[in-house]
Image (spheres, grey):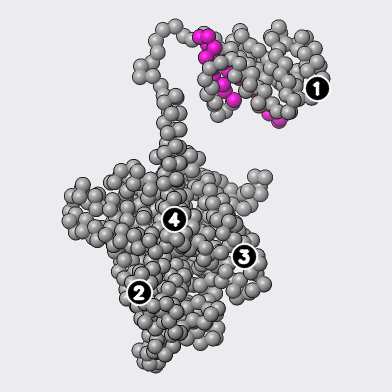
Amino acid sequence: MRSLREFLIGPPIPTRRLASERLSKFRALAAFSPDALSSVAYANQEIYLGLVAAGAAGLAFAWPIALGIGLLLGVLALSYSQTIHAYPSGGGSYTVARENLGTNWGLIAAAALLIDYVLTAAVSLTAGVAAIASAFPILWPWRIELALFLLAVITVANLRGIRESGALMTVPVYLFVVAFLGMIAVGLVRAAFIDPPGSLAAAAPPAALPLSLFLVMHTFASGCTALTGIEAISNGVPAFKPPESRNADLTLRVMAILMGALFLGSIFLTQHFAVIAGPEETILSALARRVLGGGPLYFVVQAATLLVLAVAANTSFADFPRVASILARDGFLPSPLSQLGDRLVFSNGMLLLAGLSAVLIVVFRGDSHLLIPLFAVGVFLAFSLSQAGMVRHWIRLRGRGWQLKALTNGLGAATTIATLCVVAVSKFREGAWIVLLLIPTIVIMFRMVRGHYRETRKQLALPAVPRAGAPPPPPRVILPISGVHRGILEALDFAKSISRDVTAVYIEIHPGDARRVREAWKEWGQDVTLEILESPYRSIVDPLLDYLDTLDGQLAQGLALLYRRRRHGHGRVIVDIPFYLRH
């Protein structure tokens, strides 16, 4: 079993190599940006589908909407750049909101982030599979299985370590960037020197709906999915090579520039050439066909788009485990989520993310269109809390240039809160209500976990002053036995060396075995009492625990051996489990 595990994820890595496992800027961009860059694909499509219903008059608003989203992108990039330097330990929106707005707001931001990362993984994989199945319809009935297969591949790649996952994502991400920027460059040259502008009035289909403010705002909310993933780098600053903050900031700036160029460039060319997509074609596919023709370069752009969508889930695997580990260290999630695995990654968090994503893929039948409406609420809720928290941060510290920094984040908070309201209202009936219900539920769960750990710490806390007086009496020892042999006799000698009150316990699984053990114990048991416990359901643990319950008191379980401590008069009860090694 261990050899199979090492074959899949590799041998354990010593802790001293943690620094060498961190990411360079080149690999970090590939590891943290797939979600942000690939969102251009479905954001453009959502804008087109939202406006084409109003015909040419609606499509004329695509460029103003794109400029508004681009401006919001710049504000967010600047804000998270400041967050990176102010909070180099990572955590993003959760850390900022908790330290500046209070624990409850921090937990709301954390819940929104975790939901967003799970949705990102599920949507990216299902969207990638849908694109592949569109090119090869024979795969359509297997889209759930294909999405789960891709999820398994990405999970294993990330379990192998951040360096290897970053290397795996490098080719699809940079292929997409080069192919898409190349297409935009060709399109701009054609627009400037070769092709005249197109006419939306002549190309657009007849309007099916009247142009309205609600339609424009709804389309703006849909297009804001282009901003998903921009906070990823601020959550993963510790994954960068030193100097962490500087490298993360530079990577964020490059990612924001690429996002803006891809998004605004594609929208501009779509408007300039008056591109209209067919009934079974995306708007980006139609644009690529218009700029590059139907030759090999067109298929390169399409293949690169499919690949980057397939690996966009990696952003979630880079950030969900880190946010979960910070929450676990703060006591709001189970502590195993804070522990590094064999490959110096938060493997428990990755497995949790994979499991939740798999559930969404199966429940929503591998259909990304059912999942996309859930996207933007959590994203902009986290954005808003992060921006507001940074305003409070600058006002509290009042360092150099704090007024300008607070003004920048205040502008960001105002714009993201306004966008959040638009998204929540326009997307409510399409599924946003699910996220609005989930967030307080998850916050309650955080509080319950924190309460459990507080109660546990209270029970295990040492007294303020060491207890004085006479030492406690010797403990009472319970010795479970599986029979009478040399190993049991050695355990019996040990038990008698620490206490004169020893009781052996035999659990009878098969009727009749107790008689043989009782007879052997009379000869070898050294006058120690033997208790026989019947187990009609062939369980060993339950009858033993029931027996211990009769001794009355509180239990505390150890790690190296099963250790049960109970008040028994003025003494303690210890369970001594014999352990045998074969040489």
Q: Can residue 492 be seen in this snapshot?
A: yes
Provide residue 319's location: percent of width, then percent of height.
Answer: 44, 53
Determine which of the numbered discs, if any, sits on residue 433 in the image. Answer: 4
Residue name at image x 63 percent, y 52 percent: 7
Q: Quadrant of residue 66?
A: bottom left
Sequence-first disc among 4 and 3: 3
Secondary structure at badge 1 equals loop
The label number, if any, that marks residue 452 in the structure image: none
- Residue at 45 percent across and 33 percent down: it is 452
Secondary structure category for the residue under label 2: loop
The disc labelled 2 sits on which kind of residue?
Ser
Residue bearing the label numbered 2: 212
CA separation in Å, label 1 and label 4? 58 Å
N-terminal of the pair, mark 1 or mark 4, is: 4
Amino acid type of the residue tagged 1 in the rendering: Pro
The mark nearer the N terminus, 3 or 2, is 3
Q: Earlier in the sequence, mark 3 or mark 1?
A: 3
Work out whether 283 lies above or below 322: below
Q: Secondary structure at mark 4?
A: helix
